[in-house]
Image: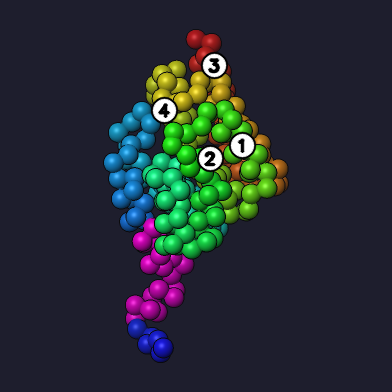
Amino acid sequence: MIFVETPERKAEARSPLSHRFSEAVAWASDLHGSQRRKGSDTPYVAHLLSVCALVLENGGDEDEAIAAFLHDAVEDCGGRPTADEIRRRFGVRVADIVDGCTDSDETPKPAWRPRKERFIERLRHASDSVRLVSAADKLHNARSVLADFRREGERVWDRFAAPRHETLWYYRAVTSRLQENGPQPLVEELDRVVTELERAASVGGRR
């Protein structure tokens, strides 16, 4: 087959993101289209956009950016059949990154604490790509929780499946696990935000 060098093909060659990324954005938007962030009217896709941006801003490639957009698809939008569809559409590497960021593909989900403990243990041996997407995910979530806590106070913890101390434990445990690979700007920022959240929650809890 002979490929003709069209203007469109030249533009695609210059771009770090191809039609695969556009397809992932559209598909993830469809999958999560009716979902909202916990305790708010914010469309869930806002979280996916933010995680993807963090991945790209921290050197992520196209596969990692696609996985960032799809990191919750298996857990929240269909389980194993969705994982199989990700593999079919976007390839093994993207599917493996999403799998590494998924703490359960079961419905109903297993008990919260054992599920989170298993995820933290899996991070110990996770690939750099999984750790990158996980760090971006947890950073955006921690920022959102901190902002919501400042607006709403103690009510913010009511939206989570676990109580305040367990939620804070989880963010700190994930951060500590990610820090084991040495200093990285994204993980350092996660540590700063989680520390600020811990301090704010401690002060708020004494009121």
- Locate residue 145, reporting x and y percent: 46, 30
The residue carrying pointer 1 sits among few (fewer than 14), some (14 to 19) or many (20 or more) residues within 10 Å by Cα, namely few
In the image, what residue type sits under mark 2?
Asp
Lower sequence index among marks 2 and 3:
2
**Residue denoted by label 2:** 103
Q: Quadrant of residue 4?
A: bottom left
User: Is residue 127 in view from this perspective?
Assistant: yes
Q: Measure how far apart labels 4 and 3 are at the Cα level.
A: 15 Å
Residue that appears at 46% across and 67% down: 16
The residue that mark 1 highlights is 118
Q: Amino acid at mark 1?
A: Arg
Mark found first going from the N terminus, 4 or 2:
2
The spot of residue 137 in percent (x, y) is: 50, 43
Q: Earlier in the sequence, mark 1 or mark 3?
A: 1
Residue underneath mark 3: 203
Mark 4–mark 2 CB contact (< 8 Å): no
- The residue under label 4 is 148
Residue beneath the point at 53% across and 29% down:
112
Q: Is residue 188 above or below residue 22?
A: above
User: The magenta stretch spans which residues?
Assistant: 7-24
Mark 1 or mark 3, whichever is nearer to me: 1
User: Contact, CB < 8 Å: mark 1 with mark 3?
Assistant: no
